[in-house]
Image (tube, rainbow, N blue to C red):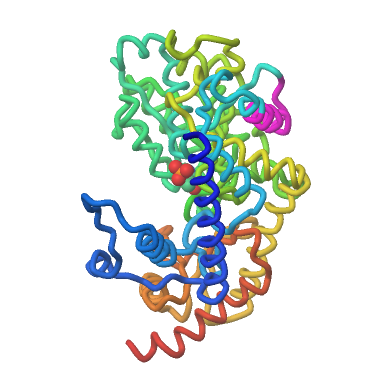
Amino acid sequence: MAGNQNINMNNTLAQFADLANTMIAEEAQKPMAQHIPTDELFSTLDLSLADEAMDEAAFIASFKELVLSTPKTATKAFFNQLFGGRNEKAILGELFAVLLNNSMYTYKAAGPQIGVEKVVLEKVNEIIGWGPQSGGTFAPGGSMSNYMALLMARDVINKDIRHQGVRGAYTAYTSEASHYSISKNAAFAGIGRDQVRKIKTDDQGKMIPAELKEQIKADLAAGYTPFFVNATAGTTVLGAFDDIISLRNICDEFGLWLHVDGAYCGAVLFSKKYKHLIKGIENVDSFSFNAHKMLGTPLSCSLIMVKDKQHLNASFSNDASYLYQTDDDEFNPGKTSLQCGRRNDALKFWTLWKSVGTDGLEAIVDQQFHLADVARKHIRNNPDYTLYSFDESVSICFNYKDIPARDICTALYEHNELMVGYGSFDGEEFIRLVTVNAQNTDVEILEFFEKMEKFVAETLSIEA
Ligand SMILES: *Cc1c(COP(=O)(O)O)cnc(C)c1O
């Protein structure tokens, strides 16, 4: 039986290599999958499930069709979200995380993989400038990292909430340009969406510290208990960085937890040239970033780092005699995680880091800012464009020939040309190009504009 399983696995690996090669070869020819309108999806692809088993060849044919019809996020046509590309070394780690299939709650179940996770977390803490008191864990995404930060802050302000539930009226603070997970998490945590204060931003999308302070004072006067401030390192639309040092001073004055949501751009930590954007990071209470965004690992790979690791234990540990049977808690990260069974999200980051070194991570980050400079230069040199975003951001927000951004983005998508999204700030809607795929070069960025300009000239003007 065991022998049979291995023969089947060899077959599976051969099928994988075959399909992967086909897919990658096709990507070079056709960087975008054929767009399928939702009302044609189930008539275009056979996704149905039947009672009977399927003939092997028919199964593979059907699976191949699905793979080749799926949006391609690793190609030079994808600029739609805050991830992209395909880092080979990270993929090798991720593929083995699947094959090894460990669950990262105990040393007994994951062995040296626990060491991999520990080394990555400790190295990140060292770079932040934190000592042995610091800790961290991998969460299932940036939203969940923010959730963990909010829960730790909640349990610090009142340690009884874990047992008794939320009784008082607690307020959390985040900028109006921050990620929607802050409000969603406040609902999960029993704080309530209405107790999240959206602080005004300046004209560059950064939280205004004076506005934060005024709001905290007003809430205190009204009988609320402020407890949590979320700063953003790379806002989702403009890619703006809140001023951590000013926010830290305010948090110290009022005794509040300061978290930095660096899901998008927190990885500037690895760049000598750009880490000034998160100046003061060593003085925050918690900091999260997604390696699957700026560092280009596969989804998802999100780290939540804490200055004092006791908070992870205080909020997330739970005894479970069926699970924690051996080894010390330092090697049983299930004691500090949101979930029970845990995917091995650390391995892909480790294989990347191990192979390219910290210098290589820095080069990945710097390349994205370089590509952003190339994009901004193209825009600034062409009067048909209006630029809305700022330097030192990997989000390039612009309009072209005053055509509504959503019209251009949707038409590019439906015509299988490019995937790029739009966003808005201060009442203006614009195209948001992200240069987060460090495998792109100047050529791909200039090609993006060339393609878009040609498309507007040839296709959009005819349709209009
Ligand atoms: C992407 C993002 C998140 C959410 O991360 P997920 O991994 O998608 O849950 C949170 N905050 C910011 C600023 C982001 O850009």
Q: Nearer the viewer, residue 377 or 115?
A: 115
Q: Main secondary structure of the magenta part?
A: helix
Q: Is residue 178 visible?
A: no
Question: Horizontal placement of 191 versus 394: left or right?
Answer: left
Q: Is residue 188 above or below residue 85?
A: above
Q: Nearer the viewer, residue 299 or 183?
A: 299
Q: Is residue 135 above or below residue 24?
A: above
Magenta highlight on residue 121: yes
Q: Is residue 165 above or below residue 139?
A: above
Q: The C terminus appears in which quarter of the rendering?
A: bottom left
Name the residue: 44% across, 66% down: 68
Magenta highlight on residue 117: yes
Name the residue: 32% across, 19% down: 223
Residue 276 position within the rendered picture, expressed as x and y whole percent measured from the top left: 70, 44
Q: Is residue 73 visible?
A: yes
Name the residue: 68% across, 68% down: 441
Q: Which residues are magenta?
A: 116-131
Residue 371 position within the rendered picture, expressed as x and y whole percent measured from the top left: 66, 64
Name the residue: 36% across, 71% down: 35
Residue 87 position within the rendered picture, expressed as x and y whole percent measured from the top left: 63, 54
Count of numbered labels shown in the rendering: 0
Residue 295 position within the rendered picture, expressed as x and y whole percent measured from the top left: 63, 48
